[in-house]
Image: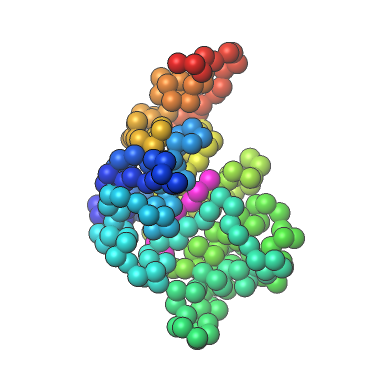
Amino acid sequence: MSQAIAVKALRVRLDETLIVDGVDLDVATGEWVTVIGPNGAGKSTALRAIGGLVPFDGTVELNGVPVDRLPRRERAKTIAGVAQNPVVPPAMRVFDYTLLGRTPYVPPLGRESAADLEMVDEVLAALDLSRFASRRLDTLSGGERQRVFLARALAQGARILLLDEPTSALDIGHQQEVLELVDHLRAERGLTVLATMHDLSTAGEYADRMVLLAAGRVVAAGPPREVLTEANLATHYRVRVRVVEGEHGPLVVPVRGRVDRSA
């Protein structure tokens, strides 16, 4: 199977501080890989580097092409991202925000084509957002806004999705709604997904493989059952948990008690 994302020896410094330290990571075409790790592990920074948004050392290839050799427009046609807290212009309406995803296809000083408008209509319909097309984003619920953020990414026509904590601000019902939608679209459209998540049980249910980062390094990688172990989580999260078998993957259950964080 071909590699949609291939990362070797990725290192990222921010303000002279080494945040990501020699990460190797690959995602096969059509695969869903989720990166987990404690706060400050470098998850979001690694994702931004893979998307070509921050300077890095090492190599990042998208469909076999180094990301830093892709012109910005071609990169935007290849990979689309949903940030933790997307910046939304004031009073932006759903249709107009989604239409921003077509920017890579609009010639300089040009206007959106009929095909661009049709693409937005199609994406809004697929995500059950057509009825919100004229609504302002700031009038929507958290789950509805998250679907709009995903709609903009899908409107780019990219086959690789980078999702940085896509459910962090959502209740459990909206979390499941968004992740089921992503998984459905992945199967329907042949998308490749690289995500970061904090909710370990949820991450384990949806990911084909997981990568555990700690202090900027990969400390475990593989199927969820091999990564979400009590030993791994005790060592790198400093927590007491029980890992039990769920219907779709391992479930992580916190166990009350004091944890020694001085080690």
Near-viewer residue (74 or 124): 74
Q: Say whether residue 183 is magenta.
A: no
Q: Quadrant of residue 65?
A: bottom left
Q: Position of residue 62 (x, y in %)?
A: 31, 58
Q: Position of residue 223 (x, y in %)?
A: 35, 35
Q: Quadrant of residue 89?
A: bottom right
- Looking at the rendered image, the quarter that the C terminus falls into is top left
Q: Say whether residue 163 is magenta.
A: yes
Residue 259, compared with residue 212, is above or below; it is above
Q: Position of residue 259 (x, y in %)?
A: 54, 15
The boundaries of the magenta stretch are: 158-165
Residue 190, compared with residue 73, is above or below; it is above
Residue at x 42% of width, y 41% of height: 17
Residue 261, compared with residue 161, is above or below; it is above
Near-viewer residue (215 or 218): 215
Q: How is the image coloured?
A: rainbow
Q: Left or right: 71 with respect to 185?
A: left
- Residue lying furthest right in this view? 139
Q: Left or right: 172 with respect to 43?
A: right
The chief SS type of the magenta part is: strand
Q: Left or right: 203 with respect to 168?
A: left
Residue at x 53% of width, y 82% of height: 112
Residue at x 44% of width, y 77% of height: 105
From this viewpoint, is residue 229 visible?
Answer: no
From this viewpoint, is residue 177 visible?
Answer: yes
Residue 67, compared with residue 112, is above or below; it is above
Q: Quadrant of residue 99?
A: bottom right
Q: Position of residue 205 (x, y in %)?
A: 47, 37
Near-viewer residue (261 or 241): 261
Residue at x 55% of width, y 71% of height: 100
